[in-house]
Image (tube, helix red, strand yellow):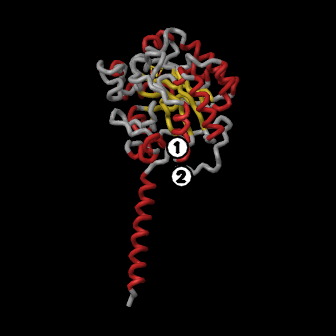
Amino acid sequence: MLSFLSVCGLILLALATAALQRWIQNRKSVPVPVSVNYHLTRKCNYECGFCFHTAKTSYILPLENAKHGLALLRKAGMQKLNFAGGEPMLYPGFVGELAKYCKDGLGLESVSIVTNGSLIKPKFFASYGKYIDIIAVSCDSFNEETNVQIGRGKGSHLEKLEELRKMCRKERVKFKLNTVVGKYNFQEDMNETITRLDPFRWKCFQVLVVAGENDSDKTLRNATRFTITDKEYQQFCDKHSHNKCFVPEPNNIMKDSYLILDEYMRFLDKGNNPSKSILEVGVDSALKAVFWDEKSFVERGGIYDWTKEGNRNPETNLDW
Ligand code: SF4
């Protein structure tokens, strides 16, 4: 017969095991934020008609708070940080200092910037180029009139694009292109210019409507004027998919596969309420408040050769 003490011991053991199982389960249900898009500002100097991250606020975090948030993300498993906006290069010092911190302070594998390219100066490259792996420039057409029609600048976008490509080559920063495919450009043949520009990656997004951002005349932008059918998008893809840099992103892949932090460092959830700021509740709790489709992130090729030296950290423990 078991003694009273043995029974107590068994009960305690069972309780501890259950608590441990609950803890493990809880850990498993929190995704690892391997690649994060930090939309540090909503302000922009361009007026693209389909923009889905519009200037609803002009807020930007103090530098030290932003650094703290990035350190929290690193601790939670972040390997790549992408600065986006709005136009992040409205704040070159802020972006540059954070890029430096990400590399020197946090040891991130990859730091990238998505930019319209109009504001980057050689001085920025000279000070911060070594901390940046990838610069992705948005360009929707190689016909300047079409860019103007879309709102992508006022007529000098292609000239800026060429300058930036040269700066990237000189500073050995990977040059990437992002194109939004919509009503005004889905019939364009871009093959010749893509061959000449030779980006290491060319992402072609189907124009996306996001509730509360660009879904009607009541929002700051109305992307419904730019939408195309899946068949029209496919037509564009068929014309360009032979380019080895080509990466298609139709609406169904885009919707849930990006981890997006806004200017307050809150995770966004496609027009639903954002999470609380990671500065307030921590990364795990903020992540649990939104839906992020990790599988879709992996399937769309979210993890790729994103370090400029091509040497990924061997300690990275990615099980996909
Ligand atoms: S450049 Fe980007 S952030 Fe600026 S308006 Fe165009 S899509 Fe929006």
Point out residue 28 in the picture as x, y percentages from the top left corner. Answer: 45, 55
Task: Please say if 3 is above or below 50.
Answer: below
Using the numbered discs, state the Cα–Cα distance from disc 2 to disc 1 in whole angstroms.
Answer: 21 Å
Asked which quadrant contains residue 149, the reply is top left
Element marked by disc 1:
helix
Element marked by disc 2:
loop
Q: Nearer the viewer, residue 74 or 203?
A: 74
Which residue is label 2 attached to? 319
Q: Count neighbours of disc 1 (C-alpha within 10 A) and say few if under 14, some if 14 to 19, many if 20 or more.
A: some
* Badge 2 amino acid: Asp
Q: Count neighbours of disc 2 (C-alpha within 10 A) and say few if under 14, some if 14 to 19, many if 20 or more.
A: few
Residue appearing at x 57%, y 42% in the figure: 79
Specify the quadrant that holds the N terminus: bottom left
Residue 186 - label: none
2 vs 1, front mark: 1
Which residue is label 1 attached to? 72
Point out residue 205 in the picture as x, y percentages from the top left corner. Answer: 45, 28
| Horizontal side, residue 227 vs residue 193: left or right | left
Residue 238 appearing in the image: no
Residue 318 appearing in the image: yes
Q: Nearer the viewer, residue 128 or 205?
A: 128
* Badge 1 amino acid: Leu
Q: Nearer the viewer, residue 97 or 143?
A: 97
Q: Residue furthest bottom?
A: 1
Point out residue 151 in the picture as x, y percentages from the top left corner. Answer: 44, 14
| Horizontal side, residue 276 vs residue 112: left or right | left
